[in-house]
Amino acid sequence: MKIHGILAAILFALVLSPSCGSRKQAAYLTVPFSASTNIPGKEYPKINPDLSVTCRVEAPDAISVELDLCNKVYPMVQIEGGVWEVTSDPQVPGFHYYFINVDGVRVSDPSSKLFYGCGLMASGIEIPEAGVDFYLEQDVPHGEVRMQRYWSDLAQTWRICYVYTPAEYDTTPDARYPVLYLQHGGGEDETGWPNQGKVDNIMDNLIASGEAVSMIVVMDRGSAVLANSPDWERTRNIFDFSAYEKVVVEELVPMIDACYRTLDDRNSRAIAGLSLGGYQSWSIGLSHMDLFSYIGGFSGAGMEPSPEKYPLSLNEQMNLLYLSVGTEEPEQMYAGVKAFHDMLENKGVQHLYYESPGTAHEWLTWRRSLRQFAALLFR
């Protein structure tokens, strides 16, 4: 399946430049407070009542220091003792990557925890959302996110995936569980959903409230290079993930079924992902309907331009097709996902379409999508 050229260009542009959605006032905040994503003990960055961010950086020998947050650069001012400061515009709630530019060199903020995104280790800041806690840690039974190593014969290397197991997994040794394979986006890796996505909190809260059935969630790196591949394959287009597809089908799924107490039939498997991972999920899922009966794309869709690739028979073959997008996504991205939804609707292919209000190509869109998608699985 070849990706649509226009949509490929849109996705590629977004890989290294996640966007942010609309800004809203935060009347529930009364005083500035240190961001939860700061390194423990670090006072700055601080989040202000209007959701603006005040950042301070110590760089006594620098000539110029800037804050790069949500695709806007803010010149910082030296206030005292080599400390530079700036306050941003109000920010949309959710998680955002950011950087510090020191004399033209982009670096991470020494006061921030680091997250793999934009193709590198980046600073990140969590902006709180009024009255919303579905992705926050609550007083409920907690599952685990386990690091699982496995040997890939196809790639002739060790790979690492992360596996969420529900709270009761170790105390109910006779129970078996359905599995969601959850893909990250371009420029991110298998740590994206456990760290930026807060997948464990989302699943813990859904399962504890009865909104979702207990399930295993598998998060692998969405790329692979087969052993003895020519050099050109190692730097090829990111949308050619045929090698990773082989790893998923021939190694990852069998390994998970062997190492974990899974329900190993297609009606007990789902595959979903965000952005590039959404395209991967639609493509892999529809190409291997013997393995998967639920497919989800969050800001990412099946992008084959030929409508005949999506026959009405999918209504009988698939348990759920899911598609979502943020209302504040870049215009072409929103239009592309919406056009795919319209095509499916016009053909009569049953699917669930969701628009995340006020969010763009960012983690709050994808957290909301996961919450909705996971609650619909394996019923």
Image (tube, helix red, strand yellow):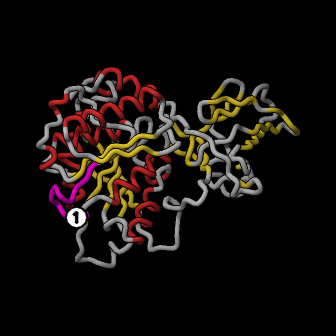
Q: Residue 172 sits in which quadrant? A: bottom left
Q: Name the residue at 55% across, 47% down.
A: 95
Q: Residue 163 sits in which quadrant? A: bottom left
Please name whichever residue, 75 or 21, is drawn nearer the observer in this view of the structure: 21
Query: According to the image, label 1 marks what residue?
Result: 262
Q: Position of residue 133 (x, y in %)?
A: 53, 61
**Relative side of 308 to 359, left or right:** left
**Relative side of 282 to 44, left or right:** left
Judged from the image, the secondary structure of the residue bearing numbered disc 1 is: loop
Q: Name the residue at 22% across, 45% down.
A: 350
Task: Give, as a single range, the part of the protein colored magenta.
Answer: 260-271
Q: Name the residue at 82% across, 39% down.
A: 83
Q: Position of residue 330 (x, y in %)?
A: 48, 30
Q: Position of residue 287 (x, y in %)?
A: 16, 40
In the rendered view of the protein, which quadrant contains the N terminus? top left
Q: Position of residue 204 (x, y in %)?
A: 42, 66
Q: Is residue 286 magenta?
A: no
**Relative side of 91 to 166, left or right:** right
